[in-house]
Each structure stands twice: as structure tokens, then as C-alpha cells.
Amino acid sequence: MTQQIDPVALTNATDITCESCGNYTFQPVFLFKRISALLSPDGREGIVPINTFCCVACGWVNKVFQPASGLVAQDYTPQQADPSQLTLDL
Ligand SMILES: [Zn+2]
């Protein structure tokens, strides 16, 4: 069952603005965390992509959108970085 947000409550909600430039629109982007073999569940170094949002105008990532230091990556499967599989479409 999906909970609906009261439209009146949403109208009165505070807009989040960019801490750098004051813009109020954001777009989804990824942060990438490199995880050491010592901390990786399978003992191999890997890269963890993390969804977040950046300012459309200047690219800034607000603190509220930055992953907390206590971030728990659940259902995480580390991916080995393999440069041979990277492609660049020009
Ligand atoms: Zn900005």
C-alpha cells in the first residue's frame, strides 16, 4: 500500500535550494566510492556507485544529498573496475 503525501502539506513544505548558488532544481547523478579489499564483503577491491542529486545550474551536491559517513550498503555486490569494458561513444 502506497502512502500519499497530503497536497496541502506539500504546498507548504520548504524548498531545498542549492547551498552554492540558490538554484532549486536538481538532477540525479552518481557518486562512486572506491572500497578497499579489507572492507569489501568478498575481499576484493571494488567500486560502489551511489545515487545522489546535484544542482542543475552549478553541479553542486548539497550536504543533505551527500552520503553519510555511516552509510550502510545493503545488497551490495562489488564490481571490479575493468578498463577494457569501458566504451566511449563519440
Ligand atoms: Zn547550484
Image (cartoon, rainbow, N blue to C red):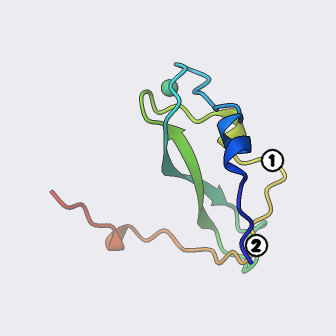
Q: What residue type is labelled 2?
A: Gln
The residue under the point 52% across, 19% down is 21
Per the image, label 1 sits on a secondary structure element best described as loop
Q: Does ligand 1 reach within 8 Å of label 2's beta carbon? A: no
**Which residue is the extreme one toward the top?**
21
The residue under the point 73% across, 71% down is 40
**Position of residue 89 in the picture relative to residue 41 (left or right):** left
Q: How far across and down, in percent of the image, does residue 39 sit? A: 78, 66
Q: In which quarter of the image is the N terminus?
A: bottom right
The residue under the point 34% across, 73% down is 85
Number of marks present in the image shown: 2
**Which residue is the extreme one toward the right?**
70
Q: What residue type is labelled 1?
A: Ser
Q: Quadrant of the C terminus?
A: bottom left
**Position of residue 69 in the picture relative to residue 83 (left or right):** right
**Which residue is the extreme one toward the front?**
8
Query: Looking at the picture, does residue 51 appear above or below residue 74?
Result: above
Determine which quarter of the picture holds residue 76: bottom right
Q: Are marks 2 and 1 in contact (CB under 8 Å)?
A: no
As drawn, the label of residue 69 is: 1
Residue toward you, 57 or 41? 57
Per the image, label 2 sits on a secondary structure element best described as loop
Residue toward you, 40 or 75? 75
Q: How far across and down, in percent of the image, does residue 53 sit? A: 55, 45
Q: Is residue 66 visible?
A: no
The residue under the point 65% across, 38% down is 11
As drawn, the label of residue 74 is: 2
